[in-house]
Amino acid sequence: VLVGFYKPAAAEEGEEGEDDGDEGEMACTAEVSLDAVGAPGAPPTPTPPLEFPYICNMTVKTSLRRRGIGKQLLKACEDLVVKMDAKTRVYLHCRIIDEVPFNMYIKAGYDIVQTDSILVWLSLQKRKHLMRKELPQVSVGSDVQP
């Protein structure tokens, strides 16, 4: 689980040299599973390959959206996958109705692999895209570069 905190730049500038312990407010969270052992018990459809890393439950606090926090959280998830795993492919789901995150994923290099059937509506669920991104391969001991 990744957790991100947000502290406005103005607060940081006004408190230079002081450490009041204020970490800011919790702004975002995401879950990353690296393989089948850490995968969700009942992954949503379309089912991602269990042997590859999977990012899920990404969320940014509503009042803090449209500030690039989601993009930074996604990058942090990808960096974690690269550092912790030899796999160079990562998967995630995006609901069809969620245009803003969908566009963020497309801009970040994700492609649609599969879209679930319209029949998922019968189980009162929203339709989703399974998306995939090929991550840069990093040699052992090197740092991930932006």
Image: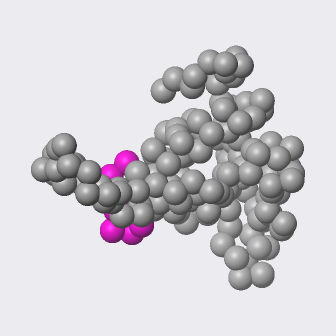
Asked whether residue 35 is in view, the answer is: yes
Front in this rendered view, residue 105 or 79:
79
Residue at 87% in and 51% down: 36
Residue at 26% in and 57% down: 20
Q: Say left or right for 72 vs 66.
A: right
- In the image, residue 68 lies at what x, y percent? 37, 48
Dominant SS type (magenta): loop
- In the image, residue 37 lies at what x, y percent? 86, 53
Residue at 50% in and 48% down: 73
Q: Is residue 73 above or below residue 3?
A: above
Q: Is residue 128 above or below residue 17?
A: below
Instruction: Count numbered badges in the picture.
Output: 0
Which image quarter: residue 117?
bottom right
Q: Is residue 22 magenta?
A: no
Q: Say left or right for 139 vs 12.
A: right
Q: Is residue 87 above or below residue 101?
A: above
Q: Is residue 64 magenta?
A: yes
Front in this rendered view, residue 125 or 22:
22
Colour convention: one colour
- In the image, residue 4 lies at what x, y percent? 46, 55
The quarter of the rendered structure image containing the N terminus is bottom right
Asked whether residue 100 is in view, the answer is: no
Q: Which residues are magenta?
A: 61-68
Which image quarter: residue 6?
bottom left
- In the image, residue 74 lies at what x, y percent? 53, 46
Residue at 86% in and 44% down: 51
Q: Is residue 86 above or below residue 47?
A: above
